[in-house]
Amino acid sequence: MTWRLPPVRLKALTDVSDNPGFFHLYFATHYQYPTNQALNQFKDHENLSALMILVHTLRQLPKPVGCHAKNTAIIPMPTTDKRLVKRGFYPVMVLAKWLAYHWELPIWQGLSRIADSDHQRGLGRQARLDNIQDAFVLNDAPPVRQLVLFDDVATTGTTIQAAAGAIMRYSPDIRIIAVCAAHGTAQMSLLQTKEG
């Protein structure tokens, strides 16, 4: 089975010189109507009918070839304690559990978000990069050789790049596959190509 939308090639934000740190970001749809409204309703208002739309979106993602429970684990993008207290729940974990069930892969929570940075929403690419520097730390060695780094939305990809960089800094041989429910829009950010 092939992916429905083409992946985006990202470079991990890491200073490991012998590992170029490239990985692919796969996504089910673009962050536009109705997905953007469903995500906002679920994350900000705990709207469970919106969750069902998002679960359907995640079910469109085929499991990456060669991934199984003995060699791959899903890492939900960690959140800050401040945001967890404010929301009262961990929306990315809820979605990651649905993806783990769909793909029959375990969840591994060996990555933590240590910097209580400002919310990424509304920031431009450079501001996002500055905001997320050194925000993640690996708590333990990964128990598998490949990790699916999962987030609900990847607008510019900087949060995923920073998280992947933290993993590759301490486990440079790990294979990372980034997956999100939605990414930017067809006209936005990582999907644009520069000519010339």
Image (cartoon, rainbow, N blue to C red):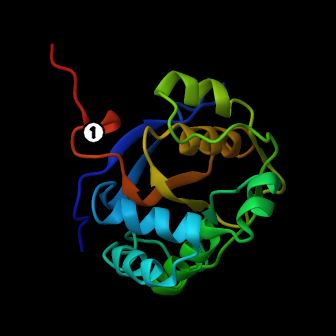
Identify the residue at image location x=59%, y=79%: 97
Location of the N terminus by quadrant is bottom left
Instruction: Determine crowd level at label 1: few under 14, some 14-19, many 20+ residues with C-alpha closer than 10 A.
Output: some
Query: Residue 166: where, in percent of width, then height?
Result: 70, 41
**In the image, is residue 172 above or below residue 105?**
above
Q: Can I make out residue 16 in this image?
A: no
Location of the C terminus by quadrant is top left
Query: Residue 179: where, in percent of width, then height?
Result: 45, 59
Q: Report the residue marked by disc 1.
A: 191
Identify the residue at image location x=37%, y=59%: 36
Q: Is residue 157 left or right of residue 28?
A: right
Query: Residue 63: where, in percent of width, then height?
Result: 39, 74
Q: Is residue 114 left or right of residue 119?
A: right
Nearer to us in this view, 136 or 21: 136
Q: Label 1: state its secondary structure.
A: helix
**Which residue occupies the extreme left position in the image?**
196
Query: Residue 136: where, in percent of width, then height?
Result: 74, 43
Identify the residue at image location x=24%, y=32%: 192
Q: Is residue 97 left or right of residue 181?
A: right
Question: Disc 1 residue type?
Answer: Leu
**Which residue occupies the extreme front position in the image?**
45
